[in-house]
Amino acid sequence: MDSLNGFVVFVRVAETRSFVAAAQSLGVSASAIGKRVARLEARLGVRLFHRSTRSITLTAEGAVFLERSRRILAEIEATELELSQSTETPRGRLRISLPQVTALVMPALSEFMALYPEIELELDFSDRMVDIIGEGFDVVMRGGALSDSRLNAKFLGRFHHLLVASPGYLRRCGTPRHPDDLVHHTCLHYRFPSSGKLDRWPLRREQPDRDYEIPVSMVCNHVETRICFAVRDRGITCLPDFAVRQQLACGELVTVLDDFVEQRGNFYLLWPSGRQMPSRLRVFIDFMAERVFAEHR
């Protein structure tokens, strides 16, 4: 404990650049502060401050020690807070951004609400790339590559894409055996809200410089809409496997061109780094990581 007090005293002197100011903030005498710093320097075997009658400045060794001391004290503070919160019931509001994949997340969210009734969920379903920090979200769920170093990430699970259609549609229009056959079919597409671009169907190219001609018969930015249209014999669409698991199991939809579809992806939870994690956020992340892909693993 004496060593820990030495860290606290040293950091306070380094921040205030004054034994007197440090003493006032800690409620002790300036001479006690001076003795504490002297004992710390003797134990470390280095000088931490350059002292003169008018100023106190850090030595090179002192600058290094300040960085490490702040890190140690911050870790101790975080640990104390985490332990104190572990005995409390998680409560408060969580602002969460989620992609429009309700079939994947709704069962887990419903279970979470039942398990933690004192946590208020504010859910924003959108496929646009939100600014987590700028828009004040506590946590977001997103697929794809991670690129923002300001964020922490928790891996949730993997998925892959499928081309699907109803048996009725395929009886009427025929089953494509090769991607070139899609030119004769009704194709239902997804448009990214953020860029306005169509989502490219992940079909393996046999010739690198030649893309397949895929008609655009309908465009929307909603997963359930394309599922509904496909089930009602309206055409072929590309969807993540978890979104159509139920329809495939009961025979409402079947897959086509399986040997040519190659894209896979990951889902993550992302939240701002460098902040103390409140218990409501910690339990949400742990719960979702355990449950979201439980039925799809």
Image (tube, helix red, strand yellow):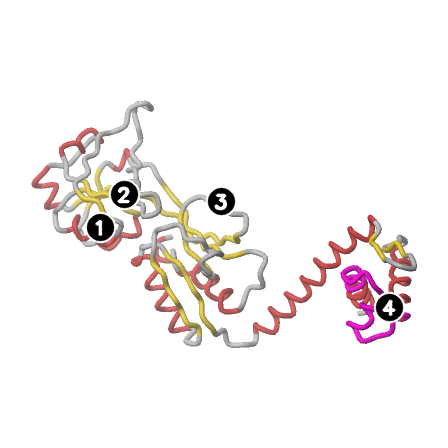
Q: Earlier in the sequence, mark 4 or mark 2?
A: 4
Q: Which residue is mark 4?
A: 33
Q: Which residue is mark 1?
A: 248
**Separation of residues labelled 2 and 1 (CA atoms):** 11 Å
Closer to the observer: label 2 or label 1?
2
Q: Earlier in the sequence, mark 1 or mark 4?
A: 4
Where 151 sits versus 257, above or below?
below
Q: Quadrant of residue 75?
A: bottom right
The kind of residue on which mark 3 rests is Ser
Q: Secondary structure at mark 2?
A: strand
Q: Chief secondary structure of the magenta span?
A: helix
The kind of residue on which mark 4 rests is Ile
Q: Which residue is mark 3?
A: 147
- Residue at the front extreme of this rendering: 54
Q: Residue at x 39, y 67 (%)?
A: 122
**Separation of residues labelled 4 and 3 (CA atoms):** 45 Å
**Separation of residues labelled 1 and 4 (CA atoms):** 73 Å
Q: Secondary structure at mark 3?
A: loop
* Disc number for residue 162: 2
Closer to the observer: label 1 or label 3?
3
**Separation of residues labelled 4 and 2 (CA atoms):** 68 Å
The kind of residue on which mark 2 rests is Leu
